[in-house]
Amino acid sequence: MANEEKQIKMIMNGVVIDHIPNEHFLKILQLLRLDKIKNPVAVGFNLTSNRLGTKAIIKMDNGYFTPQQKANIALFAHGATYNIIEGGEVVSKEVLTPTEEVNSRLICPNSRCVSRVYKSTFIPCLNDDGSKVEAICKYCELQFSLADLKEFVK
């Protein structure tokens, strides 16, 4: 465990999401609506990572994320790990990969798309060189960078 991670209290039961890319961390926090969760949540940002250079981490004490929340995380943090902790030990580790479709609190960036007045559905895909996940709007079928996706507010 790196020194930076030790600054965030160890949890006895709950979930740790590790290896979140820094550039998408704030969007993930926004989509997870952590301000609505009653469980204690710890977040770390700009932590050292051998794999990513820098990373973010989320720890939730005595709680779990829903499949929809995990799908939102996977869209923006392909390859992050979802660790279930019981009795202070990791009992399950899952590498997050985008689901076939993500129904999230995001809207399509295409101003002419019918989904702009609703929450959209996106189909994750790898970009042309296979290095990043991008999103295809299910309705207008245009492909967008994850940075272009905005939260649906109503």
Image (cartoon, rainbow, N blue to C red):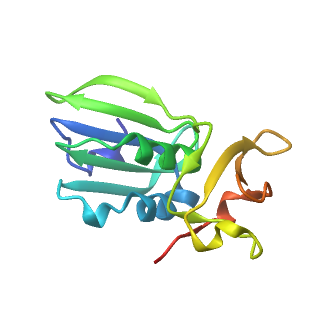
83 sits to left or right of 133? left
The image quadrant where one finds the N terminus is top left
Q: Does residue 12 sit above or below 43 in this rendering?
A: above
Q: Position of residue 66 (x, y in %)?
A: 35, 43
Identity of the residue furthest to the right in this view: 128
Q: Position of residue 72 (x, y in %)?
A: 50, 49
Q: Residue at x 43, y 65 (%)?
A: 30
Front residue of 148/140: it is: 140
Front residue of 54/128: it is: 128
Front residue of 110/28: it is: 110
Q: Does residue 45 sit above or below 1 in this rendering?
A: below
Front residue of 68/2: it is: 68
93 sits to left or right of 110? left
Q: Which of the 4 quarters of the picture holds residue 64?
A: top left
Q: Position of residue 37 (x, y in %)?
A: 24, 58
Report how many numbered discs are placed on residues in the image: 0
Q: Residue at x 51, y 35 (%)?
A: 96
Q: Residue at x 24, y 31 (%)?
A: 85
Identity of the residue furthest to the top in this view: 91
Q: Which of the 4 quarters of the picture holds residue 29?
A: bottom left
143 sits to left or right of 37? right
Q: Residue at x 64, y 72 (%)?
A: 116
Q: Position of residue 78 (x, y in %)?
A: 58, 41
